[in-house]
Image (cartoon, rainbow, N blue to C red):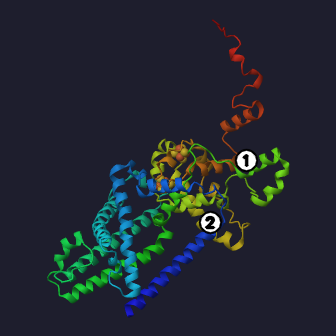
Amino acid sequence: MVKQIIFAVTLLVTIAVFTFTIQRIIRYFKLTRRAFAVRDLGKRFWVMFEVAFVQTKIFRKPVIGLFHALVFWGFCVIAFGSIEMIIDGLFRTDHFLSILGPVYTLIVASGDIFGLVVAVCIAIFLARRLFFHIRRFEGTEMKKVSHMDANIALTMILILMISLLGMNMAFVAIHTGAEAGTPGIYPVSRMFAGLFSSMPAGQINMVYECCWWLHILMIFVFANVLPYSKHFHVFMSIPNVFLSRLEPLGKLPNMDNITREVKLMLNPESIADMAAGEPVIERFGVKDIEDVSWKNYFDSLSCTECGRCTSVCPANLTGKLLSPRKIIMNVRARMKEKGPGLVKEGMSYSDKKSLLRDYITEEELWACTTCNACAKECPININHPTLIIDMRRYLVMEEASAPSGIKWIFGNIENNGAAWQFSAEDRLKWAQDLVIHVN
Ligand code: SF4
Ligand code: SF4
């Protein structure tokens, strides 16, 4: 009974802290602008299945991709055991979900195997970060705290797997030779359960209890640490893939306020309908965090900081300042900085800083070739170029600021209706001396 009460209180505290964090994040979402409407649910589920569950994009790097995919699939299976532990902890049951019979046996056996597989993969990930110089993990945006964050989360996962295997081994050892046998099959733990053979039953029970509590407490702590870490992608990446932009990568979204102006010019009578349904956007493009869309912010919370985007960015590869990973990380950091002030004091709040220039420089923005390699490579379908373009839109439309080569093109478009410096009447001059033979 005491164990049950302690468990219930711990669970309640976990849920309370988690709810508080999520509420805070929802308040930040309310500060953002609208993006596209979430339609085509069938297509979205297919993309989610393909990209999130089958992990198709991660396999572009086959070896490390396989390790990552195994960890993901392992988490999905092991989550089943965690749900069972919560039920057992609350209601004093013992392996409650064993009522599922053969399905339970299959899931428990897979969970036991995945426990070892995930532990090995995580140990490899940790070793890569600690002892090898992986270029993808470096960059100006990858501060010491980013590396620490990753290492702490990986260590926590490793402890989770070790405690899971310890718990399973002790459980098998306790039930060895028992007439009724153990619920479920534990192929890996059975191999190592012999390690407990010289221990008295009381001590094995103690090991089981310690591992059980360590495992469940780590899950509770992990759930509350994740939202403050890059490993928040554990929760966010699947929904982020579901909410992917479904349009072709090269197609830029229209700007709501420009569309509105054009519609008004074409049909002035539509002003009443528009005023009712569409928000009035005061600023063109993105200057600061309140100008980004909810999808930009969602992307920033989902980013795994894996650096796959930056590793294929031609601007970054040729030594330019631009790193698409940094752009996404900056959105998250800026919301963390300005979000509380905006929530407290309203949208007029200013801290005399902005996402543009204090976080992302003009040089970075204009280095982008809009090739979309970053968006294509991102394993969770984050779209960087749309945000970069929106920030450029702000520079051009609000500040008339652009590199001189581009300003020159803008001038030509304004004066000649084309990017070139020739007037419309001169366009066919190149053809005037041509001799055309007609048969
Ligand atoms: S779209 Fe821009 S940021 Fe993305 S890879 Fe190409 S140049 Fe880099
Ligand atoms: S944006 Fe995508 S590819 Fe780039 S670091 Fe984040 S998750 Fe990785």
Task: Tell me the quarter of the image containing the C terminus.
Answer: top right
Q: Amino acid type of disc 2? A: Phe
Q: Using the image, determine if residue 7 lies above or below residue 56.
A: below
Name the one closer to the observer, 83 or 297.
Answer: 83
Find residue 134 and report its horizontal and vertical position in percent: 37, 53
Residue lying at 55% horizontally and 74% vertically, measured from the top left: 21
Q: Using the image, determine if residue 395 lies above or below residue 435.
A: below
Quadrant assignment, res 275: bottom right
Which residue is the extreme one toward the left?
Answer: 198
Image position of 406 (left or right of 302): right
State which tag comes first along the sequence, 1 or 2. Answer: 2
Q: Is the residue marked 1 within 8 Å of ligand 1, measured from its CB?
A: no
Q: Whole-Å distance between the Cαs marked 1 and 2?
A: 25 Å
Image position of 103 (left or right of 336): left
* Residue corresponding to mark 1: 397
Find residue 388 and report its horizontal and vertical position in percent: 60, 49
Q: Are marks 1 and 2 in contact (CB under 8 Å)?
A: no
In this figure, what is the number of numbered marks? Answer: 2
Find residue 413 and report its horizontal and vertical position in percent: 73, 34
Image position of 323 (left or right of 85): right
Q: Using the image, determine if residue 264 lies above or below residue 407.
A: below
Is residue 321 at least partly visible in the picture? no
Q: Residues within 10 Å of mark 1 (few under 14, many from 20)?
A: few
Disc marking residue 29? 2
Task: Tell me the quarter of the image containing the N terminus.
Answer: bottom left
The residue mark sitting in front, 1 or 2, is 2
Residue lying at 37% horizontally and 78% vertically, measured from the top left: 84
Q: Using the image, determine if residue 82 lies above or below residue 324.
A: below
Find residue 111 and report its horizontal and vertical position in percent: 31, 69
